[in-house]
Structures are given as C-alpha cells and as structure tokens.
Image (cartoon, grey):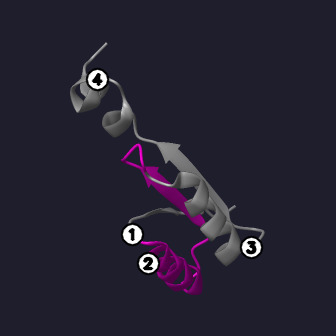
C-alpha cells in the first residue's frame, strides 16, 4: 500500500485556503492538516471550506496547537515533564 503524504496548510483567508486545496488536489494530494495557532482561528469554518472543496474521499485533520493555545503559552508546551 502506498503512503499518502499529509500536507500542512498555511493560509490567511478562506480564499487562500480554497486556492491551496485546488492546487494541491490538482497535484494529487488528498490528505491535509489544518493548524490552530490562535484561539480565534475559525477552525470549524475552515473544516467546512475543506469539505466543500474536497468532497468525499479526502482526509482533513484539524488539530489543536498546545504550544500556542495552552494556558501557560509556549513555555508550558515545551517544558519537559
């Protein structure tokens, strides 16, 4: 079975997200990560955009950044336990 590379998406607007998804799916990519680096990031809306653009058969992972969203900030996220 061939490995499916995941692409971490970086964008500032919904339009940029759509453009990146179109470009990457056109190149054959089908698995994507959405990164939450700000508590105000509209993750649910971004997932909706991905679902609209990609349709079934693609893989989107919306993940939480403990480094940028934990109560202690980056220092707490990087502190060895």
Task: Tell me the distance, in whole angstroms, between the alpha carbons under discs 1 and 4.
Answer: 26 Å
- Asked whether the beta carbons under mark 1 and mark 4 sit within 8 Å of each other, the answer is no
- Magenta residue span: 12-40
Q: Which of the two labelled residues, at mark 4 and mark 3, occupies the earlier sequence position?
A: 3
Q: Which mark is residue 72?
A: 4
Q: For numbered disc 4, what is the local secondary structure?
A: loop
| Mark earlier in primary sequence (1, 2) | 1
Specify the farthest residue to the top: 81
Expressed as whole percent of the image width and height from the top left, the position of residue 47 reads: 61, 60
Identified at 50% across, 85% down, the residue is: 23
Could you tell me which quadrant the N terminus lies in?
A: bottom right
Up the image or down, 39 lies above or below 75; here it is: below
Q: Which mark is residue 42?
A: none
Which one is earlier in the sequence, the residue at label 1 or at label 4? 1
The number of callouts visible is 4
Q: Which residue is at the far right?
A: 56
Residue 55 numbered mark, or none: 3
What secondary structure is found at the residue carrying circle 3?
A: loop
The alpha-carbon separation of the residues under discs 1 and 3 comes to: 20 Å
Query: Are there few (<14), some (14-19), or many (20+) residues within 10 Å of tag 4?
Result: few
- Which callout, 4 or 3, points to the residue nearer the camera? 4
Which residue is disc 2 drawn over?
16
- Left/right of residue 71 with respect to residue 59 in the rendered view: left
Q: CA distance from mark 4 to mark 3?
A: 38 Å
Q: Which residue is mark 1?
A: 11
Please say if 23 is above or below 5: below
Q: Could you tell me if the residues under marks 1 and 2 are in contact, i.e. CB atoms within 8 Å? A: yes
Circles 1, 3 touching at the beta carbon (< 8 Å):
no
Asked if the stretch drawn in magenta spans residue 67, the answer is: no
């Amino acid at each position: 079975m061939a490995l499916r590379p995941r692409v971490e998406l970086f964008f500032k607007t919904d339009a940029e997200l759509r453009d990146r998804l179109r470009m990457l799916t056109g190149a054959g990519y089908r698995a994507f990560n959405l990164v939450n680096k700000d508590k105000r990031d509209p993750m649910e809306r971004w997932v909706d955009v991905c679902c609209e653009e990609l349709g079934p058969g693609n893989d989107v992972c919306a993940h939480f950044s403990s480094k940028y969203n934990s109560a202690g900030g980056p220092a707490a996220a990087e502190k060895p336990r």
